[in-house]
Image (cartoon, rainbow, N blue to C red):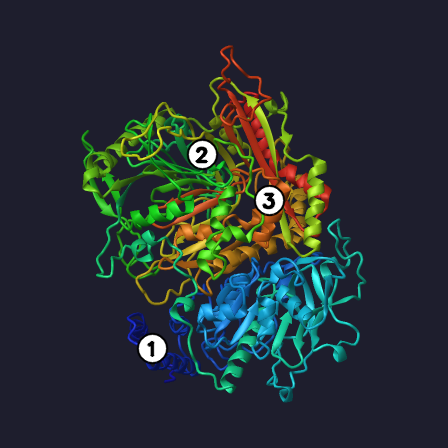
Amino acid sequence: RRSSSSSSRNSTDDALVEFLSQLDSCRRRRRYRSRRYECIYAAANVLLIHVLRSISVAPFVYAFTRTTYMSGRRAYPSSGPLVPTHSRSTAYDGKFPSASGPLLDQLSSTTANSTAVESETAFSAAHSTNTDALPIDPLDINIVLLDNYDSYTYNLYQYLASMCINPPVVVANDAYSSWDELKEAIGLDPIDAIVISPGPGTPNNGNDVGLCREAVDRSPTLPILGVCLGHQLLGLHYGADVGLAPGGPVHGLLSPVSFTSVQDDPEKGLEGFNLFEGIEQGFDVVRYHSLTVDFPNDANDSLDIEPIAWCDAIPPSLARKSVGSGGGAASASIDSKVCMALRHKIYPHYGVQFHPESVGTGKAGYHLLQNFCKYVAEKKEKNGEMYEHMPSQLCTQKKNHINESTTATAIEGKGSSEGEKVVSKHTVHIHKLSPEISMENPLPEMVFESVYASSETSFWLDSSTGSLSYNGGKPDPLTDSTCPIHSNSRFSIMGDGNGPLSKRLEYYGDNHPLENRGLRIYTSRPGGNSYEVESITDDDIITHLRKSLGDRGICTSTRMVEFDSDGDDHGYTFSDAKEFSSVDTMTHADVGVPSLPFEYRGGYVGYLGYEVRHDTRRFMCEQEVCKSNAAGMSGASHPTTSQEKIPTAAFLFADRSLVYDHFTSDWYLVGVSSNDMNAASSGGVVSTIEWMKQMMSKLQSVRGTMSPEKTIDGHKSAQSEVSFKLDKSKSQYEADIRRCHDEIRNGESYELCLTNQLRSTVTTGSETEPFGLYKLLRQANPSPFAAFLNFGGPPPMVTQPSSCNQPASVPVPGSVSICCSSPERFLSVTKLNSASSISDGADDGITTGWEFPPPPPPLRGIDDGSRRYGVESKPIKGTTARATIPNRGITPEVQAEDAKAAEELRVDVKNRAENLMIVDLLRNDLSRVCEVGSVHVPRLMNVESFSTVHQLVSTIRGVVNSNEATAVDVIAACFPGGSMTGAPKLRSVDILDEMEKGVSRGPYSGCLGYISLNGCMDMNIIIRTAVVTPADANGDDKDNNNERNDGQKDPTSWNVSIGCGGAITALSESEDEYDEMLLKARAVKEAVELWVNGSNY
């Protein structure tokens, strides 16, 4: 029905919504179990799509419809429809989604400087091709996606899954010994098409391509699309040569591509298919390759394949630029061409050298993949194939990788098959302490130093850029750009291990001797002055966190505590705080219900060191079809040199903690209470209330003695310089850079994150602890994801309960302090229906540090009983020094110099290439766990400025369904962060292992933060960090002569290590990379020198 009447149109929309709701309800109750009714269901949805095309409907109804028929794999765009509507639609104009649209990852629309060598204009062109609107009908085809262990495979998966009813089945290239074994194992009949992923290495090496070559040889009539390495494999298989690219390696750069417009000859059986149909000539593509397919001059006569697209060997951004020691374009003629696509003359086999799935290729890449899928569907229909679906266990693709004791239903609080409700083991109680009219609340540093600094185990997740001064009125963070909150952070979180439910976890992984490996769980005794060993297990830290959080259940109950103002008995009342609503929406109908502006609800706080990568690597095989022995994928050995007493990972279960709001100056007291009646006396609500009363008194006492935060006395830094020794000398570091260039040139990697460590043993004053160093560091280099972790030890007494069935020797806890000034968010997971008093500013380049969620997509779909969480990552690639360094006057000339440095960073070819590679890698990692169509890039390559450096930062977001993945699963899918490894991740890590010669990175390059009891999480990347241990804790301080007369080590001597490094690409210059590595360590090194020299600001 078409009507101009708004009421009539709304009535139509409501009727359609109701019908779709009933359809979806039927689907979720599995009322269409037979094949017949499943087909009817699919047909009804397709019919509705055509109806909606021809009537004027609200955008909500259209996008709502698009999300309901995807066989339960819903996608939620943040703006516009998931895929453009038909051109006849009156609801939309057929244009592609806006810059924040998730599926096609629109890029930054910032106006490019006309002098930029790799400007945003080049990226934007990839999305401005004038083509007909893309079809939206899902295709009923079965695709096998052969994974060559690449870091971009799941970007292909996301695109293909959004086009098809059945998501592709991802199978590693070495999962089976033969193509026949693969087909039999996955039970998929028929297989309608094969897509061969990119990957490291060369098609000449059977270990690099596995059974992909046999798949090509055994499937002459099956449509095949090879991407990058897959393209090279097709070329080699059909007689062409594959060699080094004439212009040298090209990674993360764009080139315009020209292609032949001649369609396939139907007389040869190729049904007139044109891979580039609807795409304009000269469209920009992202290139990641070191090798190319070379055709002989007589290719048309001598080979069964032919080139159908090409580009200049040297990308435009390098045509006028001298290339560095990485190999580059110096040897190639400006007129040299390379093959960008090929096809077989008879078989339906196609290859593309570029990456259609890259965020930089954009719309044209998506369109090309859709052309291929449409062709597969048409071929299937013409051949009369039966429309058989994949087996259900493969159709969902993402297997249940949660431990059996931590099933999705248990995590969701749903019961067993009888449908019983499982109650969470904890209730969170929160009391808000607002500043009084007569006196401000104390600042975080004062509180931590007074309350937690002396604790054996303590933490402070410190948004150190969020401090407000006491000099007059507070700036408005929404309007005043000078306000530190406007550009950085809002919340800080702190606590210790003295609560009644507190536990301390220490994991010693593969970087430790075999006899020391395992997970140790220590329980705090009353008073917090001793620990007992609760258990020692063989679990890795990821497995344990999954089990523990699953056993505890998602905490959906948060109570606000209000204390009476009269009398001394502190009477109190409870009120429920809003958490998850029954209907996922941002409109809060329950007016008057208190809402909290932060996500943290207590839980695990700690770090995962870089070597946890050995455990998360197994996640790949839990998720997709590949080798069961994940360790067999790597020939690299585990690190053999590590600091013995520094755990591979360490966490504290925080049941008593504080949250500070830098905007409002409010303190929040967060107490976790056990719902177990047996714990009422020690960990129940009564003890939580008593703790709150005591903490209120402590905060009042700190409030009475507070003074403005002091600043560093910069003159003390000149007293003496601490002697640091680099693990790798300058000559060795430059040799490693040359090795990286060789690996990149040979196609083994696109980018390698080479690292180094500065080490020193220092002596400080007798009363100075590592917290003194952190106070100096947060002043010298304030950062939105700064943190101080103190896992002190051994405590006064460690005992073993009689119930602990372990050896008589009791391992004591390790001892390590982490002083971190990280500017980089690794991952956050936040509730999508959370509210905040400050807008996120999704496209304005703002980052708000610890505890600020990304905005949810406005279209939420039908409530299916699950919870949906927003995931965000903010990788940094690209760093340059600021002109406005401390102790230098801020003049107009200095400001202009600083702005020039930021702009040069923004348009720098090398830095932008590095950043793009990691953005595509993070999209891939998140696509392993996020809903199809939800992964998007709202901000690409924004310059964010910190105290001493400018950084090039991108933001990637997605949506996870709690029925499919948890916060721990998100970590497992993405760890270690791609900005600390390079791409492809697995092969790059193996190469780095060889160069790092068995020396563990320790906590550096890992992540640090919290995993909350409500399913949320926030983690940084551990960079710009000093790792401090007592000088006698590691047994490796032979050069330390700080001994007392009794032969014992001086307790004021400390081992300090500072990790630093940088991404090496084909464009890297050895001298520049070495200088950048030292630049990144400078702020931390100077803070250590101030600490050693006794600076007490």
Picture residue at 73% right of the left edge, 61% below the top: 245
Which residue is rendered at x = 58% and y = 48% of the image? 981
Q: In this view, does 616 lie above or below 1035?
A: below
- Report x, y in % for residue 799: 32, 27
Mark 3, other Cα within 10 Å: few <14 / some 14–19 / many ≥20: some
Residue at mark 2 to residue at mark 3: CA–CA distance: 27 Å
Q: Residue 246's x, y, as percent?
A: 76, 61
Residue farthest toward the top in the current orientation of the protein: 1045
Tag 1, which secondary structure? helix
Q: In which quarter of the image is the N terminus?
A: bottom left
> Who is closer to the viewer here, 944 or 221?
221
The residue mark sitting in front, 2 or 1, is 2
Left or right of residue 229, residue 1005 in this image? left
Give the foreground label among 2 and 3. 3
Between 481 and 956, the one lying in front of the other is: 956
Compared with 1023, 985 (above or below) is: below
Q: Distance between the residues labelled 1 and 3?
A: 57 Å
**Label 2: which residue?**
789
For label 3, the residue is 993
Q: Name the residue under label 1.
A: 16
- Coordinates of residue 310 in the picture (x, y in percent): 71, 70
What residue type is disc 3 on? Asp
Q: Residue furthest bottom?
A: 267
